[in-house]
Amino acid sequence: MQDWRVVAVLSANLALHNLQRFAPVSLYDEFRIAWDTDYTGAGALFAAYLVAYAVMLFPMGMLADRFDNKKLLMLGAGLNVAAAVLFALAPNLALGMLARIALGVSGAFLYVPSVRYVVTSFGQKSRGQVMGWVQFGAGVGQVVGLSLIPLITVHSSLGVAFLLPALLAALLLAVQGLHLRPTRSSGKKAPAVADVFGVEGFKPFLAFVFLAFISNYAVYGWLPTYLRSDFGFGPAEAGLAASLSAIAMAVCSPLAGSLSDRLGARKPVLLIGLSISFTCFAIMVFSHSAVLIVFAALLKGVGGAMTTPVSQMFAGETFAAAGAGVAVGVSSTAAQLASSASGPVFGYALDASNSFSFMWSVALGCVVTAMLFLSTVKERKWDERAEQESGPAR
């Protein structure tokens, strides 16, 4: 039971991270009025978190390899408390932006050390399942950020609603101190960037991560617009249909991790996930049935569950020579860059062709190319991997 309390804490880390990331998205109009700004300013609140988070991922990977991950996670939760209070009480956009930047930094403190903690503190035959449950927390956080925070705002105010994440972060800080164990350093010196990218197979793996994640965000970012434009869905209906993908991903992530544990390898599960994503986009390209499109979105969530958490385990295990934290940090940066690029890439594809089918074809091409890159990456055998891991926490 002790290990599962630890899993719950690690899952809560990602839940808080995603809650804070998505919390302002449904409330742009309220922020625009409260802070006398425009939609550009309101949208910048979302971007500030993403940029700060992306910038911090690689340095956080190096820190996670060299310092006790428990302390880093507690530092991240503590920073989250302070930044969340500042955001809730901010009287203007400038202070709100500053708070969101600090929250993005805290997100990196919560994410990378959590993944490294899984890699170094759980046995190789169970850590896929563990990472799946940790990823489940990310899905829960996203749903809470998009639904509960706006609901509280309706019945109170922005300030009251955004104090809730501060209270949750304070609670998380307490349970981190109670249930997490200290971790040890990898014993390696901080690597140069060139050294990290020089590890065999790492560059094609990053290409796979980028392409797989940008295809995920094709659905997250554009499915509601497609359903409204081509099928006449209302905003609420389109949002609900799009949320099925995120729900499927959250539910299936633990199952995908367990499957990789049972197979004794991560790469086959990644390939299965890409094959499911291929099926999803093939349906979207060739079908014009709303029922089939929604079903395809559900499939994409299943495919994402087989690539998102499992790819992080693959990075931390297969490229342990570069440091598990560094490998996770760099691969997370590639994923974050993909999510940031998805808007302009698929928006340009839609503007250039005036066809959603063409846009889905671009996403399909990303999936096929991701498969090709992944096929060139060799996964070490589990006994070889164990020799390079830093071992369980002391």
Image: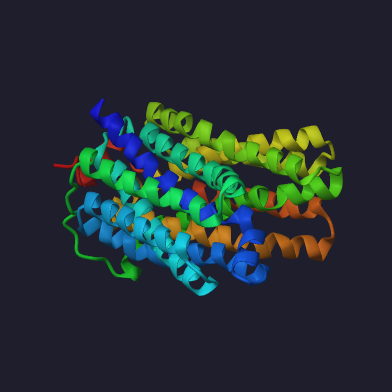
Residue depicted at 67% across the width and 71% down the height: 38
Which percent across, then down, holds residue 382?
Answer: 30, 36
Residue 265 visible in the current orientation: no
Colour convention? rainbow
Which percent across, then down, holds residue 97?
Answer: 49, 69
The outermost residue toward the front is: 156
Residue depicted at 76% across the width and 46% down the height: 235
Which percent across, then down, holds residue 62?
Answer: 28, 62
Which of the image's four quarters has the N terminus?
Answer: top left
Vertical placement of 43 versus 145: above or below? below
The outermost residue toward the left is: 394
Q: Nearer the viewer, residue 190 or 136?
A: 136
Which of the image's four quarters has the C terminus?
Answer: top left
Q: Nearer the viewer, residue 246 or 279?
A: 246
Residue 362 visible in the current orientation: yes
The outermost residue toward the bottom is: 94
Q: Quadrant of residue 284?
A: top right
Q: Nearer the viewer, residue 177 or 271?
A: 177
Which percent across, then down, holds residue 131?
Answer: 39, 38
Q: Quadrant of residue 129?
A: top left
Q: How many dots with numbers?
A: 0
Residue depicted at 78% across the width and 60% down the height: 350
